[in-house]
Image (cartoon, helix red, strand yellow):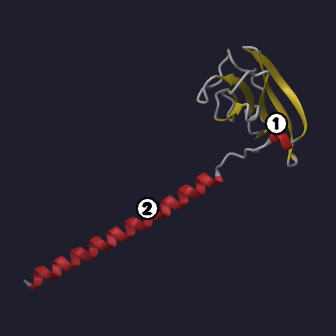
Amino acid sequence: MTKTTKVAAVLTTAAMTTALIAATTASASATTASASAAGAAAPWWSDPATCANPLTAVQRTVSGRVVQVRYGTCGGAQYGWGRILDYTGPEFIRFEVDLNGDRVADDFSTYTAGSRNYTQAYPTSSSPNRAFRACYVVDPNGTCTAGNSTAWW
């Protein structure tokens, strides 16, 4: 009986130690993942209405609405954003960002026209991989297509 009790105690202690190590490792991994995600957060400028010298890079009329990619100086750096004009109600302006040159959206910002008619802004770049386009969408989950958006800029 004494040997069985000692073996059980050793196994219990080993199991608890393993569980403690696993929990500590999982906690450290979760902390690292959160820190990495926070560090990789997109550098969006929340309100480009505060940006200086705004200009229109490209625009297109889509279903009677003027959709634009705009750019200006925000906090000392150049940013681009989307804007919609001539909208008739709570419609959506979407601004897509391509980061790797494949002309597929890697990030985006969508706003309801009516509450504000422009999106958040994203930093421009001299890299040919970075490009922006804006579009009018009827659904907040809608995406830009050749039929509803500006050209990539």
**Placement of 66 over or under 9, stated as above or below:** above
**Placement of 105 over or under 52, stated as above or below:** above
In which quadrant will I find the C terminus? top right
Q: Is residue 75 left or right of residue 45?
A: right
Q: Is residue 113 left or right of residue 70?
A: left
SS at badge 2: helix
Inspect the image, locate mark 2, and give the three-letter code of the amino acid beneath it.
Ala
Q: Residue furthest right?
A: 53
Q: Identify which residue, 1 or 68, lies in the foreground.
A: 68
Q: Kindly identify which residue carries mark 1.
A: 126
Which numbered dot is residue 26?
A: 2
**Label 1 or label 2, whichever comes before in sequence order:** 2
Q: Residue furthest left?
A: 1
Which of the two marks, 1 or 2, is nearer to us in this view? 2
Asked whether residue 148 appears in the rendered view, the answer is yes
**Placement of 45 over or under 2, stated as above or below:** above
Inspect the image, locate mark 1, and give the three-letter code of the amino acid beneath it.
Ser
In x, y percent, where is residue 111?
69, 34
Residue at coordinates 60% horizontally, 26% vertically from top-left? 139
In x, y percent, where is residue 45?
76, 45
In x, y percent, where is residue 76?
88, 48
SS at badge 1: loop
